[in-house]
Image: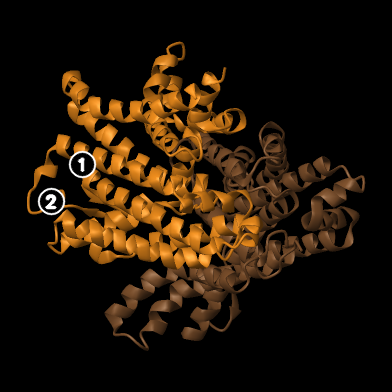
Amino acid sequence: MPTAARLDLVPVAIFAVFAAAPFLASASGAEGYVLSLLTRVMIFGIAAMALDLILGYGALVSFGHAAFFGIGAYAVGILASHGVEDALVQVPVALAASAFFAAVTGAISLRTKGVYFIMITLAFAQMLYFLASSLAAYGGDDGLTLPARSLVAGSDFLENDYALYGATLACLLGAYILLRAVVASRFGRVLRGTKENITRMEAIGFQPFSFQLTAYVISGMIAGLAGCLLANQAEFVSPAFMTWQRSGELIFMVVLGGLGSLHGAIIGAAAFLLMEEFLPEILHAAGFFLNDDLRWRLTENWQMVFGPILILIVLFARGGIVGLLRRGHHD
Amino acid sequence: MTATFFAIQALNGLQFGLILFLIAAGLTLVFGVMDFINLAHGVQYMVGAYLVAAFSAWTGSFGWGLILALPTALAFGLLLEILIFRHLYDRDHLDQVLATFGVILFLNQGVKFVWGAAPLSVPVPEILSGSVVIMDGLLYPVYRIAIIAAGLLVAALLYVVVSHTRVGMLVRAGASNAPMVSALGVNIRRLFMIVFGFGAMLAGFAGAMVAPILSVQPGMGDNILILAFVVIVIGGIGSIRGAFLAALLIGLVDTLGRSFAPNLLRLVLDPSAASQTGRALAPMLIYIFMAAVLFFRPSGLFPAKR
C-alpha cells in the first residue's frame, strides 16, 4: 500500500535529520547551542515515547511520568557525588530504581481507573518530588551540580558535546526500535486490546492487569534512561525535573505529536521545545508595530501566547502533527 | 507549651482545610456533574486574590474590594466557560487536561503582564486586625478566625443549597447520572454553566480571603490546585460532604504533620535523623494518605456515582 509505505518514511526522515544535524551545527557557527538544544529534544523525545507506550497504546493517562526523569537524574547525581561516575553502573541502577518504583506504584495505581488513575500517578510523583526537595545532603530544593559528565567504562568521552549527542541519538534509536518491537508483538496487541475494551479482553481470557503493569514498568524504565541523559546534558540535577508541570508537558508533547505512533512523540517533543525556544524571538519580531514597553512585556510573557496555542491545538488539531501528515496523504 | 502549640496548629489546620474546601467544592461539582477535569480551577483562586488586591487598592477598603471581586470572579468564570470550557465537555479527559493546562499557562503569565511579577500584598482589614486570647496563653489572629467563620458559613450555605433546594437536587442528580437528568427535560447545559460559575466564584472567594495573609503572586494557584484534587479524590468525586471531610482531614494532616512529625519521630530515631526524616516525610504525608485511601476505596470515601 503506497500510503503505508510513505508513512514509514516519517521515522526514517526524523532519524536522518537527527543524524545530519551535527554536521549542519558545525557549519552554523553556534554549534554548542544547536547541539545542546537538539540533545534536549532527543532526551524529551525518549521520555515522550515511553509515555506514548502506556498513553497511546494502553490509554493509561499517567500524570506523573516526570518522576522517572527524576529517578534517572538523581541516580546519576547521587552516585556521582559518592564517586561512582561510570555510566555502566549509574544506568543499570537508574533502570532498576525506575523499574522498582514503576512496579510498586503501578500495582497500586492500576487498581483505580480513569480520573482516579490520573490523580494517583500524580500523587506518587509529588511524593518523590517532595522527597527530593528534602534531601539536604543532595542539594535539597537547590539541586545538585554534577562534578562532570558520566564516564563510560572509565573513559570521559561524553565530555565532548558531539559524543553526548551521538550517545543520546543511539539511545533514541534503541528506544524507538525496542518500543516498535514491543508494540508489534503479541504483548502490544493485547495492550491495544485493553485500550479498546478491557471487559472483552478479560472475557477472552487475558489478565489486563499484568499486561498494563508490564507496559508501565517498561515505560518507566525508558523514561528513567532519559533522566540519566538529562542529568548529563544539564550537568545538574534538581527536584524541578519532576514537578507536575513537567509531567503535564510530557503529556502535551505526546498529544501534540499524535497519540499511539511512537515517532509522533519525538515530533511532539521537538515541536514543543523548539516552540518554547523560539516563540520569544518570533514574538519580538512580530511585535514591531508595538511600542518598546509593550513589545518587551509581550516577549517576556511569551507563555501568554503559548497557552492559547495549546488550547487551539487541542480544540482543532485532533490526531496531532502525525494526524495532519496522515490527512495530507489521504487520496 | 505543647497543648497551646497543638491548639494553634489545629486551628491553622482547620483554617487551611476550610480554604481547601472552598476551592474543592467547586472543583468536585464541576468534576462530578460535568465529568470535566478543570486544571484551571487553581488559577481562578489566583484571579480572586488578584482581583481583591486590585479592587481594595482602588477603593481603599478590603470590604469593598471583596464585594467588587466576587461578581467579577463569577463573570470571569462564566466568560472562560463560554469561550473555552463548554467546547471541551464532550472531549476525553486527556484533551481537557491539556486545554485547561493551556489556560493555566496563559493566566499565570497574564497576571504578570498586567500586574508585574513582584508579589502584591493586601493589608488586613482594620476591624479584623490584631489578635484575641482564646484560651490561657493562646493568642490567635482575628483575621484567621474570620476565615474559619466564613469558611464554615459557606459550607453551611452550600449544604442547604445542595441538599434542600431544587437546583441542589438537580446538581446531585447530575453528579450521579447526568444523561438521565438531561433525558428528563432539564437544560443540562444551563445547569453546567451555573455550577461552573459558582465554582469559579467560590475559588475566587478563597483566593480573596487568603490574600491578606499570603502574598499574591503568579502561580499561587498551582500547588493548591493539586491539593484540591487530592481532596476531591479522597472525598469521592462529586460529593460535597466528602470534599468537606477530606478538606479538613488534609488541612489537619498537612499542618500537624509539618509541626509534629519531627517530634514524633524523635521517639524512635536519634534527633538529627528524626528532624531529617520528619522534614522529608511531612510534605509527603497527604499523598501517602491519598494513596492509602485509594488503595482501600478506589473511588474515594463517598462516591457520588453508582
* Chain under numbered label 1: A
Q: Residue at x 42, y 12 (%)?
A: A288
Q: CA distance from mark 2 to mark 1?
A: 11 Å
State left or right for residue A13 relative to residue B135: left
* Chain under numbered label 2: A
Q: Is residue B92 above or below residue A96?
A: above
Q: Mark 2 highlights which residue?
A: A152
The residue lying toward the viewer, choosing from A106 and B264, is A106
The mark tally for this picture is 2
Picture quarter with the C terminus of chain A: top right
- Taking the image as drawn, is residue B145 in sight? no
Asked if disc 2 and disc 1 are in contact, CB closer than 8 Å, the reply is yes
Instruction: Provide residue B6's location: percent of width, then percent of height.
Output: 51, 80
Task: Farthest residue to the right: give it.
Answer: B185
Task: Farthest residue to the top: give it.
Answer: A289
**Disc number for residue A167:** 1
Instruction: Provide residue A204's location: percent of width, then percent of height.
Output: 62, 59
Confirm whether circles 2 and 1 share one chain: yes
Which numbered disc, 2 or 1, marks the residue that appears first in the sequence? Answer: 2
Q: Secondary structure at mark 1?
A: helix
The colour applied to the residues of chain B in this rendering is brown
Q: Is residue A12 above or below residue B120?
A: above
Q: Residue at x 37, y 29 (%)?
A: A274
Q: Residues within 10 Å of mark 2 (few under 14, many from 20)?
A: some
- Taking the image as drawn, is residue A241 in sight? yes
User: Which chain did the image draw in orange?
Assistant: A
Task: Farthest residue to the left: give it.
Answer: A155
Q: Residue at x 28, y 33 (%)?
A: A37
**Disc number for residue B173:** none
Q: Residue at x 74, y 60 (%)?
A: B154
